[in-house]
């Protein structure tokens, strides 16, 4: 797979069509893929992380998930996605606030069923809890 890296500065009027709604002047490193598809740098970075399967619906989602002061919160263990309300809380969301795409369902009920009912453990901090349930590995293994 061949790719070429270039730098663009997008004027405001082109941002909406070429950068999917980022409506200010910005410099984006883009990668022109062998199929001719152009993707923003933030999306390319997400492809190497757990979030790539969850937070890749649009450039805006990718941008806000990567910001230093994150607006979008992602908890991989239960696949929860939300908007930060304060330092310690966030509001779960079911659709992307920018493009409207349906986000994957959160998996807290499935995890609870496995931990409490199937494994008969006392909680998520039980020393007998298998390592896979401390990361997103448990739901990826099960194809959820």
Image: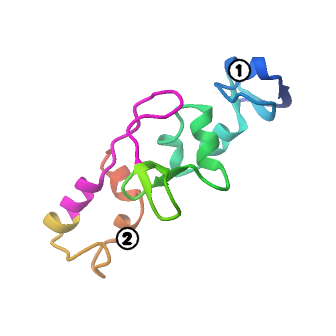
From the top left corner, tell me how far across and down residue 72 is, in percent.
53, 48
Residue at the extreme bottom: 127
From the top left corner, tell me how far across and down residue 71 is, in percent.
57, 49
What residue do we see at 79% from left, 35% from top? 29
What residue do we see at 66% from left, 44% from top? 45
Q: Is the residue marked by circle 2 packed among few (<14), some (14-19), or many (20+) residues within 10 Å? A: few
- The alpha-carbon separation of the residues under discs 2 and 1 comes to 42 Å
Res 114 → quadrant: bottom left
In this picture, is 15 found above or below 111?
Answer: above
The C terminus, quarter of image: top left
Give the SS element for disc 1.
helix
Whether residue 131 sits left or right of residue 26 in the image: it is: left
Res 62 → quadrant: top right
Magenta stretch holds residue 107: yes
What residue do we see at 54% from left, 31% from top? 98
Disc ID at residue 131? 2
Assign the magenta stretch its main secondary structure.
loop
What residue is pinned by disc 1? 18
From the top left corner, tell me how far across and down residue 41 is, in percent.
72, 38
Q: Which residues are magenta?
A: 92-114
Question: In terms of depth relative to the viewer, which is nearer, 131 or 107?
Answer: 107
Q: Earlier in the sequence, mark 2 or mark 1?
A: 1
Question: In terms of depth relative to the viewer, which is nearer, 106 or 33?
Answer: 106
Give the SS element for disc 2.
helix
């Amino acid at each position: 797979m061949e790719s070429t890296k270039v730098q663009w500065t997008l004027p405001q009027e082109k941002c909406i069509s070429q950068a999917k709604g980022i409506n200010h002047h910005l410099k984006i490193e883009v990668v022109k893929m062998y199929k001719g598809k152009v993707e923003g740098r933030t999306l390319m970075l997400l492809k190497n992380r757990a979030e790539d399967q969850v937070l890749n619906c649009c450039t805006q989602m990718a941008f806000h998930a990567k910001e230093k002061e994150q607006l979008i919160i992602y908890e991989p263990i239960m696949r929860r996605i939300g908007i930060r309300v304060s330092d310690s809380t966030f509001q779960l969301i079911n659709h992307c606030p920018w493009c409207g795409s349906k986000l994957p369902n959160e998996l807290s009920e499935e995890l609870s069923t496995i931990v409490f009912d199937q494994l008969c453990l006392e909680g998520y901090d039980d020393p007998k809890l298998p390592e896979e349930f401390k990361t997103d590995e448990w739901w990826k293994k099960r194809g959820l």
